[in-house]
């Protein structure tokens, strides 16, 4: 799941494990930290990294202020996350990612761009949602370009499944939104079916949504569009 590398070759992914009715995060290639990323962990980690704990996160304490909270799941190298957080200083953003170089990359951007409204958790998203995110507390959830698991026999491993969407709804406040994006059409179809089937959600569009202005085009997305590939956004709100 990422916005900075092609979805057909992820360094890590998150998937639904039907045998346990849960999501697992896997690190399939740890990757090496650049000098800048390693320095960012040392310099900015203490302030912007939130340690995973089996207790509800106090948003006001974590950010030093009270503001609507948006959760991004699987931020890759963090370019899109940094862009959106800069664009919306009135909101607080929590990014969850398991890939160490990606976390280091976003910490580096936080420091270089002086982004104060962003906190990161490097841990399994299912456990973060279940143990750290209070029910009814999120203003929004972003999931951009999750691993498509494009082989039919692997489709069951996709992150966007009914149990996961129900969990997201549990964490959203009334009126909060879920924004998904994918560049795989059959995954877009599945996403739309799953979200439409969730009784707690309402579609903001007739089918797929126009790309919200806050989500920037990534270099890989631009490359795909030039090759004639499609990109599908879905934005649903909690009733």
Image (cartoon, rainbow, N blue to C red):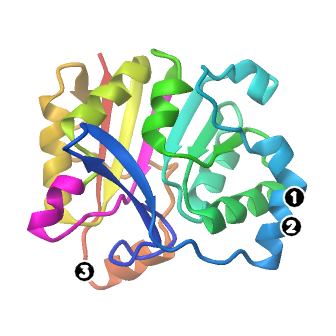
Q: Along the horizontal axis of the image, is 51 left or right of 97?
A: right
Residue 1: x %, y % from top left: 42, 60
32 relative to 214, above or below: below
| Residue segment shown in magenta | 139-157
Residue 202: x %, y % from top left: 23, 25
The quarter of the picture where residue 21 lies is top left
Q: Separation of disc 2 and disc 3 at Cα?
A: 39 Å
Task: Tell us which disc is closer to us: 3 or 1.
Answer: 1
How many other residues sit within 10 Å of disc 2, few (<14), some (14-19) or many (≥20)?
A: some
Q: Is residue 161 magenta?
A: no
The quarter of the picture where residue 49 lies is top right
Seen at 19% across and 44% down, the residue is 18
Q: Along the horizontal axis of the image, is 37 left or right of 191?
A: right
Seen at 16% across and 54% down, the residue is 156
Residue 170: x %, y % from top left: 36, 20
Q: Separation of disc 3 and disc 1 at Cα?
A: 42 Å
Give the farthest residue toward the bottom.
227
108 relative to 211, above or below: below
N-term-proximal mark, 2 vs 3: 2
Residue bearing mark 3: 228
Q: Along the horizontal axis of the image, is 14 left or right of 153?
A: right
- Element type where label 1 sits in the image: helix
214 and 78: which is toward the camera: 78
Q: Is residue 151 magenta?
A: yes
Labelled disc at residue 225: none
Q: Separation of disc 2 and disc 1 at Cα?
A: 5 Å
Residue 204 seen: no
Task: Tell us which disc is closer to us: 2 or 3.
Answer: 2
Residue bearing mark 1: 42
134 and 232: which is toward the camera: 134
Seen at 37% across and 35% down, the residue is 178
Residue bearing mark 2: 39
């Amino acid at each position: 799941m990422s916005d900075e590398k092609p979805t057909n070759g992820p360094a890590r992914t998150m998937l639904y494990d039907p045998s346990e009715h849960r999501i697992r995060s896997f690190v399939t290639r740890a990757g090496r930290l650049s000098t800048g990323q390693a320095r960012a962990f040392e310099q900015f980690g203490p302030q912007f990294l939130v340690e995973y704990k089996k207790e509800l996160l106090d948003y006001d304490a974590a950010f030093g202020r009270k503001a609507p909270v948006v959760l991004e799941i699987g931020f890759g190298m963090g370019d899109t996350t940094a862009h959106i957080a800069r664009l919306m200083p009135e909101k607080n953003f929590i990014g969850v990612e398991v890939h160490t170089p990606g976390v280091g990359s976003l910490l580096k951007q936080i420091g270089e761009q002086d982004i104060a409204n962003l906190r990161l958790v490097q841990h399994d998203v299912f456990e973060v949602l279940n143990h750290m995110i209070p029910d009814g507390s999120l203003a929004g959830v972003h999931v951009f370009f999750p691993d498509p698991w494009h082989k039919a026999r692997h489709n069951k491993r996709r992150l966007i499944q009914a149990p996961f969407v129900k969990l997201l709804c549990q964490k959203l406040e009334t009126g909060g939104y879920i924004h998904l994006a994918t560049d795989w059409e059959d995954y877009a179809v599945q996403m739309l079916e799953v979200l439409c089937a969730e009784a707690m959600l309402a579609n903001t569009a007739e089918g797929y949504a126009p790309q919200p202005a806050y989500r920037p085009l990534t270099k890989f997305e631009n490359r795909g569009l030039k090759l004639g590939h499609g990109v599908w956004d879905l934005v649903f709100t909690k009733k």
